[in-house]
Image (tube, rainbow, N blue to C red):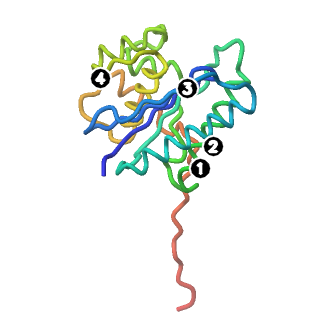
Amino acid sequence: MTDIYIGIDPGSKNCALVAWSPTGGLVAAWKPKGTMPKGVLRLRRLMTEIGAELEKLDTRGNWIKGIAMEGYSMAERYGQHASGEVGAAIKLAVLGQFATDDRRAYPTLVTPQQLKKFVTGNGNFKGEMMSKEVLKRWGVDFPNNDLAVAYGLARIAHAVDADPEGLTQFQRDVVAALDGRTEWIPIPQRRLVRVGK
């Protein structure tokens, strides 16, 4: 069983998913093919295809340990509603792969600035250069920034879950800031109380 971590770039036009393993490297890289439909048909297609990708990954002898997803950009001037809808559709696709009490069903939500800081050390770095920075830091070459963003998110999912050695101080700062940045609410442990004698 191989532990894998998944990163999802939920762009409304350029969505991407990457699965990465600390022992096996890059496991999978996915982007939608062809022309994306608009509106609710786009949302249905993303839910279906991301759900299918997660299902494939979970049945290849892999164990999905954690998922990180880029959160919404508060600086985005146009398209906030579309981004929100796409994000919700992807969250529902992830939730559909796990039990509702499973922490993995709720991705860690990473702001664009946190992602940039984790990958480059600079939260204000230009996102268009992400593939170059991922190549420089981890030696993995992606043909576009969407896959590079998803890869950076997979590395964050691993860092949040495993606290691996070799993280820089700025990466540790990002991991610390991400504590609790998920919609998962743990079920409190119930104590048994003896009644009577």
Answer with the quarter of the image where residue 119 lies.
top left
Q: Which residue is mark 1?
A: 96
Residue occupying image coordinates x 68% and y 37%: 44
Q: Callout 3: few (<14), some (14-19), or many (20+) C-alpha neighbours within 10 Å?
A: few
Dot placed on the residue nearer the N-terminal end, 4 or 1: 1
Q: Amino acid at mark 2?
A: Leu
Dot placed on the residue nearer the N-terminal end, 3 or 4: 3
Residue occupying image coordinates x 64% and y 19%: 74
What mark, if any, has residue 168 been given in the picture? 4
Q: Which residue is mark 2?
A: 92
Q: Which residue is mark 3?
A: 33
- Label 3 SS: loop
Q: Nearer the viewer, mark 4 or mark 1?
A: 1
- Label 4 SS: loop
Marks 4 and 1, Cα distance to the nearest angstrom? 34 Å
Residue 156 pos. (x, y %): 40, 31
Q: Amino acid at mark 1?
A: Gly
Dot placed on the residue nearer the N-terminal end, 3 or 1: 3
Q: Callout 2: few (<14), some (14-19), or many (20+) C-alpha neighbours within 10 Å?
A: some
Q: Amino acid at mark 3?
A: Lys
Q: Residue lying farthest bottom?
A: 197
The reply to whether dot 3 and dot 1 touch (C-beta < 8 Å) is: no
Marks 3 and 4, Cα distance to the nearest angstrom? 36 Å
